Amino acid sequence: MQMSEGVEWALHSCLSLTWAEQGEAVTAAKLAALYELPTAYLNKQLQALVRAGILISSSGPRGGFKLACDPGQVTVLDVVTAIEGRQEAFRCQEIARKGPGGRANVNYREACVASQAMRRAEMAWRRELAAQTLADLKGQVESRQPRTPELTRQQLAKP
């Protein structure tokens, strides 16, 4: 399974917003500058996060993006599904129906061992992403790189 680069961009943008000054909205341009990303494309990812209720946006001279809720309430899975959508990674086409011993009256999405294995793997992946919040990631970054919050605030404060 391969996710778009938008997932990485969205996760890092959300983490950066956890370190923004309290109540400050951050523009897409400032977030893009942190990671040398194209502003227009990052803005599309940020808008997807707004539609998912992860971020809020405001317009005007002091406009930009802010987290819509506490980082402990946003899971990594929330961010992934905001960017990639909710569809399953594996889509059983029930080809076993046409294979040796296949029968027309069987739901192979449920009966096929390959389909079952893929669903179990995807559920484990989703459970792992749902078990980690932005607050968890924030804590890990702060533990490994204690200067990151202050450096981020400094970069976001630049005109």
Image (cartoon, rainbow, N blue to C red):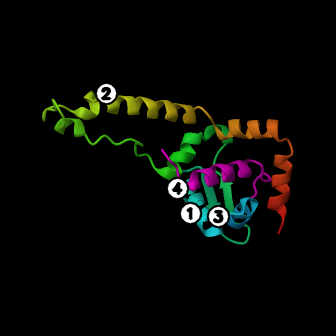
Q: Which of 36 and 85 is in front in this view?
A: 36
Identify the residue position indicated by label 2 in the image. Answer: 113
Q: What element carries label 2?
A: helix
Q: In the picture provided, is 96 more to the left or to the right than 62?
A: left
Q: Position of residue 117 (x, y in %)?
A: 38, 29
Which numbered marker is on residue 51?
4
User: For the point 68% across and 50% down, which residue is it?
Assistant: 12
Which numbered marker is on residue 58?
3
Which label sits in the foreground, 4 or 3? 4
User: For the point 68% across and 71% down, which residue is it?
Assistant: 60
The magenta region covers 1-24
Q: Quadrant of the C terminus?
A: bottom right
Q: Is mark 1 on a helix, strand or loop?
A: helix
Q: In which quarter of the image is residue 69?
A: top right
**Is 27 contained in the magenta span?**
no
Q: In which quarter of the image is residue 105?
A: top left
Amino acid of disc 2: Val
Of the two numbered discs 4 and 3 on the same chain, state the one appearing first in sequence: 4
Q: Is mark 4 on a helix, strand or loop?
A: helix
Answer whether labels 2 and 4 touch (C-beta < 8 Å). Answer: no
Which numbered marker is on residue 44?
1
